Image (cartoon, rainbow, N blue to C red):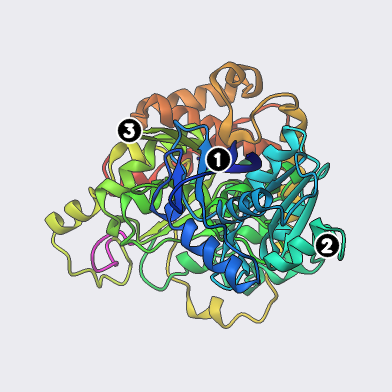
Amino acid sequence: MVVKINSFGLMGMDSYPVEVEGAINKGFPAFDMVGLPDAAVKESRDRVKSAMKNCGFNFPTAHITINLAPADIKKEGPIYDLPILIAVLKMTGAVVAEISDSAFLGELSLGGDVRPINGVLPMVIKARELGYQKIYVPFANGAEGAVVDGIEVYPVKNILQLIAHLSGDKPIEPAVAEIDEDNTDKQFVPDFSQVKGQAEVKRALEIAAAGGHNILLIGPPGSGKSMLAKRIPSILPDMTFEEMIETTKIHSIAGLLDKNGLVRTRPFRSPHHTVTAVGLGGGGTGTVRPGEVSLAHNGVLFLDELPEFSRMSLEVLRQPIEDGKITISRSHGSYTYPCTVMLVAAMNPCPCGYFNDPSGKCTCTPQKIHNYLNKISGPLLDRFDIHIEVSAVKFDELRDKEQTEPSAEIKKRVDKARKIQSERYKGTSTSCNANINAEQFEKVCIIDDEAEQMLKSAFESMGMTARAYDRVLKVARTIADLDNSEIIKSDHILEAVQYRSLDRKYWGK
C-alpha cells in the first residue's frame, strides 16, 4: 500500500511542492527514509514514533519506507514531521479522510504537540497557486498563513486535535488574519519633534525619505547621528500590501515574525559592527538564510560606526545596494533575496571623533585620520546619494522651549512627493527616484538651461564620477518633487550638489 501526502519545501524566497510517499512492506521492522533528507529530516522517524505512541496510536511493526519527492532536491529541517506522521496514520487506517486537496506542515514534539516552523507564508502562497484548498500548519503560524486569501489555513495545536478534525468529530476553525489596528502607532515611537536643532540634517533626511536615497551622516560623538537615524521610519511612507507580503515572506523564512503574522511597518535593521559578511549579506552552511540587508527590504538598513565594520562585510553591500537584490551561490544552487533598502550610515570623521570640529579637541595624527577614513572604499562612498555633516548641538538649541516640527508634518510632505513619483513610474518596476533606471533617466530628470550650466560647473570642478553625476540628478529630482516642480531648476541642483561636498572635504575626492 502506497499513500501520498502533500507538503512543501523552501528554496530561497520560493517554495516548491514535496510529495511525501509512504509504503509498508513485508520484512524486518524498519523505518527507512529516502529522497535526500538531511539530519533533521532523518530524525523525524524518532519524533513520529514517540508522538504516535504518546498519543495512543500503535506504531506498525513492519518495514516502512518514506520517500520525499522530488528526490534530487535536498530536504532540510523538521517541517516534514507532520506529513510523515499523517502518511503513517493513513497507511495504518487511523486516518481515512480524503486529503488529496490538502497539504501539511509542522514539527512534532515527542508528546504530539505541533511546533512552529519557519517559512510558512511562502509555502501557503505556493499551495494556493497550485490549487490546494486546505493547508494544515502549526497553531503559532496560523495568523501568518491566514493573510493569504483563496485557501483555508488550519492552525493545529497537536495531532489529537488534527485527527479529531479529519474524522469530523471536532472541526478546527480556519485561521483568520489578526489585524492590530494600533500596531503602527506602537512602532517607532521616536519622533523628530524630540530633536533639538539640526535643521539642515532634518532637511537632508526628509529628502532622503522622499526619494528613497541612501544617506551618510558624519559628525563628532554626541551630535545626534544615531538619534536622527532612528527617527527616519517615522517619516517614511506607509507600506503597500504588496510590500507587506514580500517583507513578511523574508521575515517568515528567517523565523522573525510576531503574533500578528504580517509585517505592517517598514523594517529598521541596525546590525552591530561586528556582524560578519554572511550575517550582513546572507548565506550560511546548509540552509541559505537572508542577511540583514534582505531583512531590511522595503525599510532602513542603519550602519552605525561605519568604519568599524570589516572591509569584507561592507564590500558585500556594494552590488546589492545598486541592484536591489542579492544572489547567494552555493554548490547546490543559487538563491536570490530582494533587498531594496534605504541605506543610512553614521560615522565619526576620525578615531577620536573631533577632526574638523571647532572645539579643536582632535588628537589624531593625519596618518591616523587618513587610515580611518580610507576604511570606506570609494565605490561604497559613491553609493550614498547624500552626505551630510552633523555638527554638535549648541546649548541654546538644547534649552530652546519652542516645539520643533513633528514627524507627522514631515511625513505629509514625504507622502506628497512619493505620490508624485508613484504616478510618474506607474506600470514600471521603479518605486522612487533613487531607483530610476537608465531608460527613464533622460525622461524624468528634465533640467532648464541655468540648472544645466550649474551642474556642468559642479561636475568639472568637483571631479564627479558618472555615478555621482547620476545621484546628484536623482536627488535634485526629489527636491523638485518636494517643491512640486516638474522641471529641475538651478536651486534644486545647487542643494543637491551641496550634499556631495563632504567626500571632497574628508576624503579629498
334 in relation to 391, above or below = above
Q: Nearer the viewer, residue 477 or 74?
A: 74
Q: Secondary structure at mark 3?
A: loop
Dot 1 or dot 2: first in sequence order is 1
180 in relation to 67, above or below = below
Whether residue 469 is in magenta: the answer is no
The quarter holding residue 81 reads: bottom right
**Residue 469: % across, % down:** 45, 28
Q: Nearer the viewer, residue 109 or 383?
A: 109
**Residue 312: % across, % down:** 26, 46
Q: Secondary structure at mark 2?
A: loop
**Residue 493: % across, % down:** 55, 34
Residue at 64%, 21% in the rendered image: 446
Q: Could you say which disc has been placed on residue 13 in the image?
A: 1
User: Image quadrant for the N terminus?
Assistant: top right
The stretch in magenta equals 348-355
| Cα distance in 3D space between marks 1 and 2 | 29 Å
Horizontally, residue 338 falls left or right of residue 273, namely: right
| Cα distance in 3D space between marks 1 and 3 | 18 Å
Give the number of callouts.
3
Q: Which residue does the numbered mark 2 point to in the structure image?
A: 172
Q: Secondary structure at mark 1?
A: loop
Q: Nearer the viewer, mark 1 or mark 2?
A: 2
Q: Could you say which disc has been placed on residue 331 in the image?
A: 3
**Residue 55: % across, % down:** 65, 71
Horizontally, residue 379 falls left or right of residue 179, namely: left
